[in-house]
Amino acid sequence: MIFKMNIFAQSSFELTGNQGFNNESSSLLNSFEINPSNFSLLKDWGLTLSYGSEFSDEINSNIYLLSLSKRFSNHFLSLRYTPGYQKDFLFSTGESIIFEDSTIQTLNSQFSYKELFGSGYSYKLSDKFSTGFSLRYFTEEFTIESVRPIFGDSVDIIIESEAEKNNFWKADIGINYFPSERILLSVSSINLFTFGETNLSAENEQLSLKKDKAAQLGISYLPIKKLELNLIYETTNSFQSGFNTYFDIGSGKLGAGLTAFHDKFQTPFIAGIIPALSYSNNLFGVTLSGVKYFSDRKEIQSFSEFSQDGLTNILNNRYSFDKAVLTLTFTLNTIKVQSVELADVEIINEIYPTLSELYLDSPFAIGKVINLTEESVLVKPYSRIEGINSDNIQSPEIIISGNDTVEVHFFTLIPESVSKSKTEISYADFYVSVSGDEPDDQLQKAVLVNGNNSWDGNVSNLKYFIKKDLNFSLNYSKEILSNYKTQLDTLPNNLSDFYKTKIIFNSLIKNLVYTSDPRASSEYVQFPGETVNLKGGDCDDLSVLFSSLLESVGIETALVDYKAAEGIRHVNVLTNTKLKPEEANLITENDTRYFLRKNENGEDEIWIPVETTSLNNFDDAWNTGVEKFNDEALQKLGLATREVEIIDIY
Amino acid sequence: MLNVEQSKIPLRGEMKPRLSAGKAGFAGKKLLLLILISAGLTLAQTYKVEKVTGSAKILNSNDKWIDAKDGTILSPNSILVAEDNSSVKVSGNGINFTLKESSALSISSLKQMTLDELLLALAMEDMMNAPRKKENNNGKTTAVYGTKEGAADKIIHSDDFGIKRLNGALQLAESGFKESAVVTAKEIFRKYPETKKKADYRIYFADLLYEFDLYEEAYDEFTSIKELKLSDQEKSEVENKLLLLNKRIVNK
Amino acid sequence: MKHFTKYLILFIILLMINGCDKPAPTELVQEEDPLEIELITKDTEDELYSSGYDSTGVVYNPSRGFANIITVSGIKTSYRNSTFSTSHAQAIFFDKSSQVLSPDGRLIGFHTRILGNVDFNTKSAKLREFRIWFKDRITGNIKDTLLGFRHILHHKPLNQDDNFNFRYNSSVSFDFDPVIGNPVHFNIPTPSEINGLIRFEGQGNNLAGSISWNAGAPGHFEIIIGGSHRGNHKVFPLYRLKTRDDGRLEIPKGLLNHIPLNRFERFVFSIIRKNEFHIENNDNDLFILSQSIHSLVVDIP
């Protein structure tokens, strides 16, 4: 914040006023005189207190101004109380009365002018235009003593005091225009509307505050960053001109300024100057300023001159004395300055609700974040997908160096409870925050949220489908196995898994049909329960079902993904019999029918491939699986060329 | 009972042109190889029995033994077994091969492989063994070691069969299908763990690795062989090989 | 932050309590002439006050206590469009030891005494009864009483008997030939003629008036505003306004408004330019008054 000293001629006189308009200085004083359109760059709350002294024969101190302002997005509102804006005149009419006892009393008149309250409103139309109005409340009081005879039994003269009061409002409007960052032009009215006046008697009418309509044109120009030149001209032929400059010190700014003004009703041509010195930082500012008139200011002036020329400005007129003012301003910024900008967000993954934890490891969106400040900042990204997240989901924090731009990853978590029957377009809100509760920037992007059965085609993600319905699978498998309890009990332990696999498969296929049109529903995978209910599915559905049933009773499985660049994609299942190589003959003599995989302990276990779409019986399915696995995974070196991939379910 | 022809251990002079076949260099070349190989691989070959001398059987993919007769078509996932004092001549896909007595051969292993393919096949083992995360707690049962009697007549003593299979692999090597032989042997040693103890077979196939300049693999293999129960001759042979390999590896 | 705002508000309140001085008012002064207003008549029914007013335009107050009074006056009276001039000269010798009291004990005058012959402008002054009227405050009635005789020359239009002409801006000669003692002679300078004009604006309670006259030399100048009773046309002086002899006066509004119309019918504005001389001599002091008067009689608008 920087304070400028501006004094404005004639109608617009401002003790400390500042109308800083570039980002270096934020305006907040509600000087409706210089700023009838109430333009301001204040970001949030502003509080100003001006306290000063006037140097006449005595020194009189007063609170000149107390104001409060607030910005609400494009609207700006201010209120001020100006107890110190007053000027009194004492007029000895020259009449005196001699009483019976020979005492003499002179008759006096008193004229009092005050501006009590003001309020202003402005609206930012665009980055270049702003318009507003101000409303000020004045009160003037004329107290005139006069002789009055009383005719009773005897005649008496008394001194009668007649007071006439006039309260009125002044309203003015104005427009501010920024042709560029360095120039501000403003046009406002002076005394455009006055209303609420009471009718005064003829003499007092003449003494009332002059309300001639006029216009005010202002220019502020920054030739270089730290220097501001100002000029305001009024159509009553008053003007003022000045400059402000500042220097950075520490975390604040030290400013100095000087303004000279010419007032139509004051002599000499440059009636006075206003020097100012200020210090400001992010939180508050203090300005010491003064008004120095170049003519001798007398406490006694001519009445006829006064009644002829009248009073136009309460605070600055030929009867004003030199002043010294201390102004404090506080900006209570509840709105913080934006440190980072979220320039863009790219959604890189559609949301598949079933693949719930996928997005914990893989981001679903990548944002471009720009650090607007010079220092490093720690950015906290977070996001919320409508319909998926009930709260904001935090993504990892990232440090961005000053003025740098980085990519930020947004992760999300899909709660178990989320269930989407069909694919729909939702939207996601992305936020980046540096400090505090409010984000520095945010963006909203459309996100495709797929239905529950949607699948991204990545076989390793089928495990989510397998694991989602484990309760169903467990019940189903248990029910199947319960029918074979006696047989299973008589089996040697090491054959248990193999036979369970066989039993489950054979029971399962009794009710299933293979709908061999994998392409048509390649993005649609049924949950195990659905496959059972629908009594069929494609290779993905069947593999998911089979794997799920086996996993639910503790049999290890893996999916085999036959990617087949030129052919048809296919999936089937490898199951772990947990048999050791030397036990192979318990299930087969033909060693081409099984494959060895090391477990965590480094021990070989026998795994057999099962073609889940072969729905005749288990042995056929096993053979078919062997054929395909041998051919594509082993003989064609598919595992090495990555044409075939084994995906463990765990 | 071993009917092994002493394989030729290549002399120094006959060293095959060395490819940078160490594991490290291999990984680098893989992408290129993938492109070459996936273009070149053909479908599974089909063979038929040309002539059976003596008795031979075929164990098909349904676990059924059928007699091998002249003209029998052999499917890839079947195993051809030549009984004692028998031999089977097999042809197909431009290949002629005679399986000698007491040997068993899986038909799919009867193929020419390039060295690159061999390298890939060896690497594939790792892929098969991709470690599975220990997360599952759905009543994982621990396998209890032990067998129960029953269906004994169907069982051919695995040791015996394993050796027959090894013999088959041996013959593959002798017939010029060395690469396939190496792969097959590796598989057999794994599937028939008892055969791991057969030092002679192991040395033979380890030498093949050496022949292919797969020094690290050979070295690992010989190191492992060293743990076996070896005859003195075998011991010294192994040690010599180890020293030799060491030098090769260091000199790379 | 909260503490901060709390202290701030406290500070502001303190300031507001302590720091609010009213700014020193700027005094405006009128270069116009000062105006003194004095109330003359308290009791408009009391004819005591009117006694010395009517036709001579002079007010004397017995409580001022002059033993000897000599007045010469040139009086013009204007009413509506006609003006007539009067010249008036009188000499009154009071016996301060012989007070005249009203029934209610008020001092209403002294008895006069004849000490000799008085000549104004070599014309011999007539001796006429000097009667005053006063209000008996007990009964409320108006009474009169004879104080004695005064030497008087009064020249009015249609009254040619007293041949005395007051000459403006010159002098009137005074001769006193006492029974006992030496004759006294001196010249009384007379002020210049005064001509006045009154203008009214508005009416009723908004009456404003201004008087203009030919400005004269600096000296005593006063304007007496009086009201003329309904019915008997007796004029009661109400206020004396002292201002500069600069030719203009705005009559303070308050004086004009509030006149009860049931009592007064006309205003009489007497513009008086006078010279006064006081000669102190213990109980035998002398008061000489020479004045030029223009009385403007106007109906109350």
Image: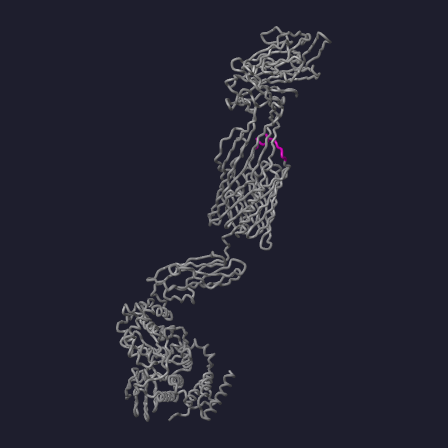
Can you give x and y, in whole percent of width and height, for residue B154 in the image? 30, 86
**Camera-side residue of A534 and A630:** A534
**Camera-side residue of B106 and A94:** A94
Is residue A223 depicted above or below B228 in this figure?
above
Work out whether residue A548 can be spotted.
yes
Work out whether residue C76 can be spotted.
no
Residue at image point 48% right, 48% down: A71
**Camera-side residue of A605 and A220:** A605
A412 with respect to C232 (left or right): left
* Number of numbered discs visible in the structure rendering: 0
Is residue A250 depicted above or below A305 in this figure?
below
Identify the coloring.
one colour
Is residue A596 depicted above or below B53 in this figure?
above
Can you give x and y, in whole percent of width and height, for residue A200 in the image? 51, 30
In the image, the segment drawn in magenta is A298-309
Q: Residue furthest top?
A: C161
Q: Toward which corner of the image does residue A566 lie, by quadrant?
A: bottom left
Quadrant, the C terminus of chain A = bottom left
B183 with respect to A184 (left or right): left
Can you give x and y, in whole percent of width and height, for residue A366 in the image? 44, 63
Q: Is residue A307 magenta?
A: yes
Q: Toward which corner of the image does residue C31 lie, by quadrant?
A: top right
Q: Residue furthest right?
A: C182
Q: Is residue A444 magenta?
A: no
Q: Toward which corner of the image does residue B166 lie, by quadrant?
A: bottom left
Can you give x and y, in whole percent of width and height, for residue A244 in the image? 59, 48
